[in-house]
Image (tube, helix red, strand yellow):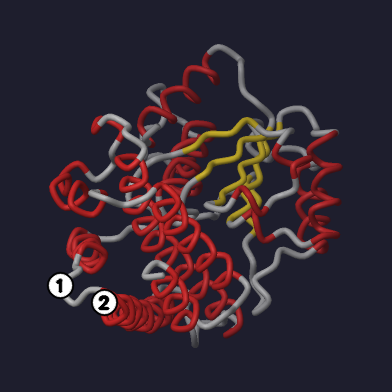
């Protein structure tokens, strides 16, 4: 569902007293999942009759991450992990009395980055949540989280543009994926190289944007924190690009299987999809999807993007 639909469901739950103690918002932490988390927090802390108004002090503090009753956690180390020490601070915070007399809330940005000890400590919090508390976990990789944590949350899977790919970048990626003018190995290597160059540019852009933000480098913020945030932003953008590749090859596989065109995600490129699917065996279509998935997994393990992409696209030509 989209952010508006998800928010409406949560709003009704708050009005009717049916609020889960923990929500897993599945989407880009700095994209649609972050947007929904912000709306939920403003709903809880708004001081106006029509909630959320977006203009009162409660709404502004929630939006600016300065509300005393909201505890924020994000990976701040180069390892990109949430530490057990951070979870212990969270536990201490949510057990304190609310300063505003309302809810106590905690937000875990990139919840999939919980380390082993941190995940186990957080599990105890989920099992015995204090009354009047709300936990919001943001992730675009729920498969990387402990099943025991997932089972104790209400999941909201969001749709949208992911980490915020603009229309130009979205179309450029799709043009690369659908361009087979060279064919075979040359086409595979050209696609891998083009996407790798795009990712390098996005990485530089992410670092530049984080340094230019208020509270960025040179403003009493640890350089490691700025770097971690830039890395997180870049990985979200990379994930959004790779999801486009997954969706493209998934659409081809759906057509190869004989599924109706209404099941296709990229309907604006239906002619190209039909052309790509024509004469393709199901085993090849499935292999292509799996090749992209494997590339994503390898990049998450810090394999160089250029190597992971080249191997993936070359596998598709076999």
In the visual, does 196 lie left or right of 62? Answer: left
Which quadrant of the figure has residue 240? bottom left
For the residue labelled by badge 1, is the local secondary structure a helix, a strand or a loop?
Answer: loop
In the displayed structure, 114 sits above or below 1; it is below
User: Residue 100: x percent and y percent?
Assistant: 63, 37
Marks 2 and 1, the one that precedes in the sequence: 1
Give how far apart the Cα atoms at labels 2 and 1 are: 7 Å
Q: Residues within 10 Å of mark 2 (few under 14, many from 20)?
A: some
Residue 225 position within the rendered picture, expressed as x and y whole percent measured from the top left:
59, 77
Q: Quadrant of the N terminus?
A: top left
Which quarter of the rendering shows the C terminus? bottom left
Q: Which residue is mark 1?
A: 181
Q: Nearer the viewer, residue 253 or 70?
A: 253
Across the whole image, how many numbered discs are drawn on residues? 2
Residue for point 61% across, 35% down: 23
Residue in view at x 25 percent, y 30 percent: 262
Q: Which residue occupies 44% across, 83% down?
A: 306
State the mark number for residue 140: none
Q: Is residue 269 left or right of residue 146?
A: left
> In x, y percent, where is residue 179?
19, 67
In this rendering, position of residue 202 left or right of residue 145: left
**Pointer 2 with pointer 1, Cβ within 8 A:** yes
Q: On screen, 195 above or below 136?
A: below
- As drawn, the residue found furthest toward the top would be 16
Residue holding disc 2: 187
Image location (x, y in percent) of residue 210: 43, 76
Mark 2 residue element: helix
Quarter residue 87 falls in: bottom right
């Amino acid at each position: 569902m989209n952010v508006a639909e998800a928010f409406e469901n949560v709003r009704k739950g708050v009005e009717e007293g049916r609020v889960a103690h923990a929500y897993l918002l599945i989407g880009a932490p700095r994209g649609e999942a972050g947007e929904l988390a912000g709306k939920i927090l403003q709903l809880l802390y708004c001081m106006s009759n029509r909630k959320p108004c977006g203009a009162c002090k409660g709404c502004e503090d929630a939006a600016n991450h300065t509300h005393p009753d909201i505890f924020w956690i994000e990976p701040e180390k180069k390892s990109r992990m949430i530490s057990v020490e951070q979870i212990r601070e969270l536990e201490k915070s949510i057990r304190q009395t609310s300063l505003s007399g309302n809810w106590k809330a905690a937000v875990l940005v990139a919840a999939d980055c919980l380390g082993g000890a941190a995940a186990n400590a957080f599990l105890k919090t989920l099992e015995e949540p204090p009354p009047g508390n709300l936990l919001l976990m943001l992730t675009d990789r729920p498969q990387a989280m402990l099943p025991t944590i997932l089972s104790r949350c209400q999941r909201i899977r969001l749709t949208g543009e992911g980490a915020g790919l603009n229309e130009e970048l979205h179309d450029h990626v799709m043009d690369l994926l659908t361009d087979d003018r060279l064919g075979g190995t040359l086409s595979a290597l050209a696609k891998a190289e083009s996407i790798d160059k795009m990712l390098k540019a996005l990485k530089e852009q992410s670092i530049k944007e984080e340094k230019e933000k208020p509270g960025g480098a040179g403003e009493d913020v640890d350089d490691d924190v700025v770097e971690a945030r830039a890395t997180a932003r870049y990985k979200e953008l990379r994930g959004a690009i790779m999801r486009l590749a997954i969706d493209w090859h998934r659409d081809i596989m759906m057509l190869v299987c004989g599924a109706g065109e209404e099941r296709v995600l990229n309907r604006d490129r239906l002619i190209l999809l039909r052309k790509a699917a024509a004469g393709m065996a199901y085993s090849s279509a499935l292999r292509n999807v799996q090749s992209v998935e494997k590339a994503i997994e390898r990049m998450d393990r810090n394999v160089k993007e250029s190597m992971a992409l080249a191997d993936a696209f070359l596998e598709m030509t076999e």
